[in-house]
Image (cartoon, rainbow, N blue to C red):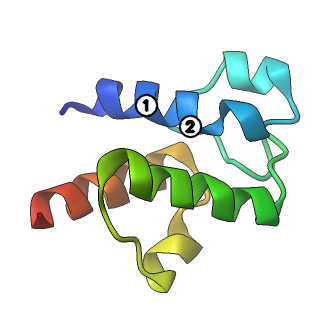
Amino acid sequence: MNKNDLITYLKSIVKPYIQDEEAFENLSEETDFINDLKINSANLVDVILDVEDEFDIDIDNEAMEKMLSVKASVEIITTKLAEK
């Protein structure tokens, strides 16, 4: 799976939790979940759980703390998929 596919999957996962539609429409690798999309920390946990389900991976607490942007999330998902 390439990076653009991952970003597309990620976009569909975060959509129910966003608070800023315009930032969502302009989502890129540099998009920050909290500052740009206005996703609160409780919903960010939901996003991570949804990512785990979607990709059938386990994300540990250390990785969770780093998943604050699209770029970081793509890197973590790619690493976890490679470990499978």
Residue type at mark 2?
A: Ile
Percent coordinates x, y for residue 15 in the rendering: 68, 30
Taking 6 as reference, is 44 left or right? right
Badge 1 vs badge 2, beta-carbon distance below 8 Å: yes
- Quadrant position of residue 41: bottom right
Percent coordinates x, y for residue 6 in the rendering: 35, 34
Quadrant location, the C terminus = bottom left
The residue indicated by pointer 1 is 9
- Residue at left offset 55%, top offset 29%: 11
The answer to whether 11 is drawn above or below residue 35 in the figure is above
Give the SS element for disc 2: helix
Taking 42 as reference, is 73 left or right? left
Percent coordinates x, y for residue 47 in the rendering: 61, 52
Quadrant location, the N terminus = top left
Percent coordinates x, y for residue 73 in the rendering: 45, 53
Give the SS element for disc 1: helix
- Residue at left offset 69%, top offset 48%: 33
- Residue at left offset 58%, top offset 51%: 69
Residue type at mark 1?
A: Tyr
Binning the other alpha carbons within 10 Å of mark 1 as few (below 14), some (14 to 19) or many (20 upward) gives some
Q: CA distance from mark 1 to mark 2?
A: 6 Å
- Quadrant position of residue 8: top left
Number of dots carrying numbers = 2
- In the image, 64 versus 69, the foreground residue is 64
The residue indicated by pointer 2 is 13
- Quadrant position of residue 37: top right
The answer to whether 41 is drawn above or below residue 71 in the figure is below
